[in-house]
Image (cartoon, helix red, strand yellow):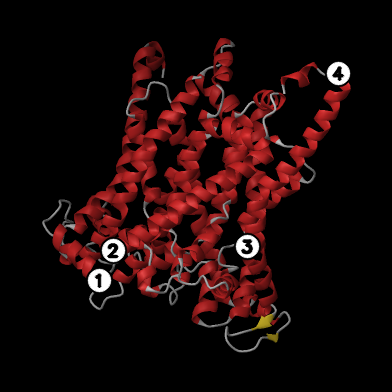
Amino acid sequence: MSKQKEKKGRKLSISKIIVYLFLFLASLISLFPFYWMFVMATRPSAAYNSIPPVLTPGNMMVENFKKVLSQIDFFGGMWNSFVLCAIVTIVVLFISSLAGFAFAKFKFPGKNVLFVAVLLTMIIPPQLGLIPQYFLISKAGLLNTLPGVMILFFLHPLGIFLMRQYISEAVPDELIEAAKLDGCSNFRIFRSIVLPIILPAFATLGIIVFTAVWGEFLWQFTILRDPEMYTIQVALAQLSNTQNVDFGMIMSGVFWATVPLLVIFLLFNRLFISSITEGSVK
Amino acid sequence: MNSISKKESIFKRKKFRSEEQKDRISGYLYIAPFFIIFTLIGLYPALFSIYLAFQKWNGLGPMTFNGLENFKMVLTDPLFWKSVYNTIVMGIMGTAPQLIVGLILAYLLNMAFLRLKSFFRVTIFMPYLTSMVAVALIFSVLFSNHDSSLANYVLTHLFGLDPVTWGASEWGTKIAISIMVFWRWVGYNTIIYLAGIQSIPNDLYEAATIDGANKVQQLFYITIPMMKPFIILTVFTSTVGAMQLFSEPTVFLGRDAFTRDEAMTIVMYLYRDAFRLQSFGTASATAIILLVIITVFAVLNTRLTQGFGKKKRGV
C-alpha cells in the first residue's frame, strides 16, 4: 500500500489497466455467444458434439441458410417484424414524450396519482390479460394482422417514466415560460423546444422499444396464425419444429435474423453517442 | 402578441389564469392516449381475468361460479410453491449481479480518460438486441446436457470439475437460466445508468472538485444520489421482470419446459394451467396471487433502495 502511495502516477496507470481489463472482459463475454452463433451457422449439425469444441467458422454458411429458406418465409418474416417494430416505435415515442412532457411541466389536478397509476400498470403481468386480450383482438377482427399485434405494444409505461425524468431535468422551466410569453401554444412548445432537446432520450427509448418488440414472442405467436403473417420470431420458432432438428440450420436462421438488427443498432448508436456527448459538452 | 408584456398587471394575471386552464387541458390531453389504450387492452382484460378467477371455465363451455375454490386449489398445490421458490431463487441470482455490474460498467464507461468508449458501449449493449428465442437457443446449446457442451468442457477441462446436466438438475438449470438472464439484461441496465450519469450537470462535479472532494467522494455524494431515480427505476423493473420470468426457461428447456419442475416459474405454472390443462379459472387465480407477490416484492425492493440512497446522503 505505502509503495503504491509513493508512486502515485504508477498507481493511477494500474487502476487504468484494471478498468480496461474489466471492460475488455465484459466485451468478450458479451460478444462470445454471437461469435459462437456465427461459428455454428457455418458448421454441420454434428459440430455440436465434437471435443474439443469447434471455435472456427466452417464452410456451410450458404447451405445452412438455403435450408432455412426452404423451411420458412425468412424475408417475409423480417419485413413483417420491421413494419411492426417501426410503427410501434414511432407511436410509443410520440405517446411517451407527450405524456412525459405533461407530467414533467404541467400542473393539473390528480397529476401525481395518475403518474403513479402509469407506473402501477407495469406490475400487471402480461400473461394475466392474455386470454381476454386474445378474445378482444379476435372480436375486433384484428386476429392474424399486424395492427392486432401492435396495439398491445403501444402501452409502454417505462417510456413515460423515462421521458418525464429526462424532460424535467433537461428542459429548463424558464425556456417554456419564455416561449409562453411569446405566445407559443403548448403543442408548439412541445414540437419546437422539447423535441429537439430530448432527441438523445428518443434514441435510448427508441432502441429499447424497437428491440423489445422485435424480440417479443408470446403475444406475436398468439395473434399471428397464418404463416404469411408470421414475424421473424414466430417463423424462427418453426425451425425447431422439424422432424430432425438441424442445429446448423437453426443457428443460421438466428444469425441472419440478428444481423439486420445489429446494423440498425450501429446506425442508431452513432446518433445516440454523438447526441449524448453534445449534451454533456454544453 | 408582443404587446401583452406591455399591458397592465390585471390583464397579465387574467392571461396567466387562462394559461393555467390551457395547461390543465393540455396535461389531460397529452396523457390521454396512454390511458385510453390502457383501459381498452390493459385494464379491461385484467378485470375480466379477475372475474375468471372465481369461475370454472375450460375456455369453450359455459362458466360456472366456483367461489374461492380456485385459490384453494392453487395455494395447496406443492408445485405452485415450488414455482414460487424457483422464481425467487432465479430472480435473485439473475437480477442482483445484473444491477451491480451494470452500475459498475456505467461508471467505468463514463470515465474521462477512457478510449474506445463507443466500442465498449456497443458490445456491452449488444446482448440485449438478441431476441429471447435466439438467446435461449444459443444458451441451450452452450449449456446442453452433453459432456461435450461448451459449458461442461470448460468445467471439466479448465477447472477439473464434474460435468453438469444443465437441463435437468435442480441447481444446474437455475444457474444456466440465471446466467442467460444476466447476459441478456446487464447491457440494458448499463445504458439506463449511463443515461442517468450523463444527465448529472457537470457543474456539480466542478464545484465538488473545487471544494476538494476526491473521485470516491464524488461517486458516493453526487453520482449515486443523483442517479437514485434511475436506480429505483431499474430495481423496480428488474424485480417485476424477475417475478414474471417465462420465455427464458420455457425456450431453454424446450420440450421439457412444462413437465419438469426445476425451473418452473410462477408464470409458467399459470401458463400450464391455462393452455395445457385448459383450466382458465385456476390460471387466473394464480395470476392474481402473482400480482400480490409482485406488489410485495416491488414495494419492498424500492423501499430498500430508497433507504440506501437516504443513508448515503445523510452521512
Type of amino acid at the residue the image marks with label 2: Phe
Disc 4 element: loop
Q: Do the residues labelled 4 and 2 touch (CB within 8 Å)?
A: no
Residue underneath mark 2: A74
Marks 2 and 3 on same chain: no
- Distance, label 2 to label 3, CA atoms, is 32 Å
Residue underneath mark 3: B42
- Distance, label 2 to label 1, CA atoms, is 8 Å
Subunit of label 2 = A
Disc 1 element: helix
Q: Do the residues labelled 2 and 3 touch (CB within 8 Å)?
A: no
Q: Depth check: A195 or B134 in front?
A: A195
Q: Residue B8 carries which label?
A: 4
Disc 2 element: helix
Residue A65 screen position, x and y as percent: 20, 62
Q: Residue reaching furthest bottom?
A: B61
Reply above or below: A152 against A11.
Answer: below
Marks 3 and 4 on same chain: yes
Q: Depth check: A6 or A60 in front?
A: A60
Residue underneath mark 1: A71
